[in-house]
């Protein structure tokens, strides 16, 4: 159960964690679907997965099935993945080189621009004009080689990344090769997983191998309007990445970009239920297919699996405690949990706006 006081803005030095009721209430989940996920940008894919005409990726935003496709003119377009006849799917999986978009239900066929080209056996329908029918379009934008979509965006995509240039410089991921996609089910509310990602405070206690790789003493966390960044030098035993920095971006509301030398890993948290979520991991690497690079990539993925298993286990424990009805919000660590506090303040602001 939540109260009006739980929605009040706080100061970092005296902040407490988000009230447990926000992790367990069905009305909160619906509010988040409608007023957070449906109104903000979602990562769909890297441009390397949409390189040629007809290449397409299917996804979901706030319960709405979507489709992103490369057109014959080279442009990217996004549509609601539902035929204008009776909501059949135009695609049920990612694909390459499609010449058109054909409904799997009744065979209505659309061009890659979303315009209806053929409607099977509709010649007897009065006043039926195929030229007036078009798939429902959604917003599509590209940032540094990553494709984003939104149903009803409330901010510009550029605003989401404002301030990231300081650490990214001119880095671009357009030429990175897509290697693997993995979905991990996690037994917790999506915000528990986000909370866990947003602080390095737990790293020495939950991730022993990762802790040896990062310099915890030099671990820094900064926040901007719509994102936060945790970064640390990479060092220590077992470092197979090479010299450089580990950059961990969290972008509102549910996206993580894990950027290390010669590697981009994207994580998107997808709410599944009040106490369930899934995390979609996509792995991208530079176009280096040498034996050494392939070994490094395989090691990176094995290491990622290990860290994810550790996170999933601790998040499940936290979810059970939050659902117990016996957890009063605890104080936050101002030095180590400022990005978590930033996330909670964005949530409180969204909840206040939705409820007024």
Image: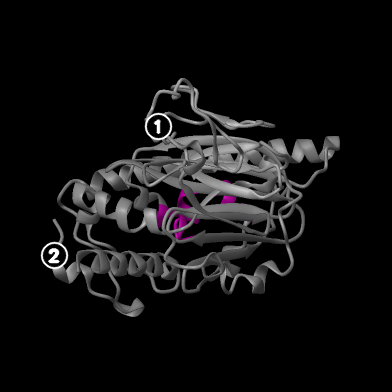
| The image quarter in which residue 312 lies | top left
Magenta region = 194-213
Q: Nearer the viewer, mark 1 or mark 2?
A: 1
Q: Locate the N terminus and report the quarter of the image it occupies.
A: bottom left
**Residue that label 2 marks:** 3
Q: Is residue 47 left or right of residue 293?
A: left
For image coordinates 62% across by 31% down, the residue present is: 95
Q: Nearer the viewer, residue 47 or 105?
A: 105
Q: Residues within 10 Å of mark 2 (few under 14, many from 20)?
A: few
Report the magenta stretch's main SS. Answer: helix
Q: Is residue 141 above or below residue 331?
A: above
Q: Nearer the viewer, residue 89 or 163?
A: 89
Question: How far across and down, in percent of the image, does residue 342 sit?
Answer: 40, 69
For image coordinates 25% across by 43% down, the residue present is: 320
Question: How far across and down, in percent of the image, does residue 180 sit?
Answer: 64, 35
The answer to whether residue 211 is seen in the rendering is no
State the mark number for residue 313: none
Question: How far across and down, in percent of the image, does residue 33 sit?
Answer: 32, 51
Q: Residues within 10 Å of mark 1 (few under 14, many from 20)?
A: few
Q: Locate the C terminus and report the quarter of the image it occupies.
A: bottom left
**Residue that label 1 marks:** 85
**SS at circle 1:** loop
**SS at circle 2:** loop
Q: N-terminal of the two: label 1 or label 2? A: 2
Q: Is residue 26 left or right of residue 267?
A: left
């Amino acid at each position: 159960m939540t109260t009006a006081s739980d929605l009040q803005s706080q100061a970092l030095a005296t902040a407490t964690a988000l009230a447990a009721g926000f992790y367990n209430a069905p009305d909160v989940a619906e509010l988040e679907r409608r007023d957070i996920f449906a109104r903000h940008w979602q990562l769909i894919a890297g441009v390397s997965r949409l390189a040629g005409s007809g290449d397409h990726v299917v996804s979901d935003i706030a319960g709405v099935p979507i489709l992103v496709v490369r057109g014959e003119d080279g442009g990217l377009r996004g549509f609601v993945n539902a035929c204008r006849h009776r909501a059949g799917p135009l695609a049920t999986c990612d694909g390459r080189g499609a010449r058109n978009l054909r409904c799997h239900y009744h065979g209505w066929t659309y061009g890659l621009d979303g315009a209806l080209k053929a409607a099977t056996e509709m010649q007897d329908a009065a006043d039926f004009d195929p030229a007036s029918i078009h798939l429902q379009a959604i917003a599509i934008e590209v940032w540094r080689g990553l494709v984003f979509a939104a149903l009803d965006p409330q901010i510009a995509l550029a605003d989401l990344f404002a301030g990231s240039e300081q650490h990214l410089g001119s880095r671009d991921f357009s030429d990175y090769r897509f290697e693997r996609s993995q979905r991990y089910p996690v037994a917790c509310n999506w915000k528990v997983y986000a909370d866990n990602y947003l602080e390095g405070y737990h790293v020495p206690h939950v991730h022993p191998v990762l802790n040896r790789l990062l310099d915890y003493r030099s671990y820094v966390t900064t926040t901007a309007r719509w994102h936060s960044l945790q970064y640390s030098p990479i060092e220590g035993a077992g470092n197979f990445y090479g010299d450089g920095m580990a950059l961990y971006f969290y972008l509102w509301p549910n996206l993580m970009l894990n950027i290390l030398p010669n590697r981009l890993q994207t994580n998107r948290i997808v709410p599944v239920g009040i106490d369930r979520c899934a995390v979609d991991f996509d792995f991208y690497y530079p176009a280096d297919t040498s034996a050494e690079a392939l070994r490094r990539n395989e090691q990176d993925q094995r290491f990622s699996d290990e860290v994810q298993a550790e996170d999933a286990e601790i998040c499940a424990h936290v979810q059970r405690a939050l659902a117990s009805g016996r957890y009063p919000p605890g104080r936050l660590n101002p030095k180590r949990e400022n990005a978590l506090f930033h996330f909670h303040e964005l949530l409180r602001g969204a909840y206040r706006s939705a409820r007024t």
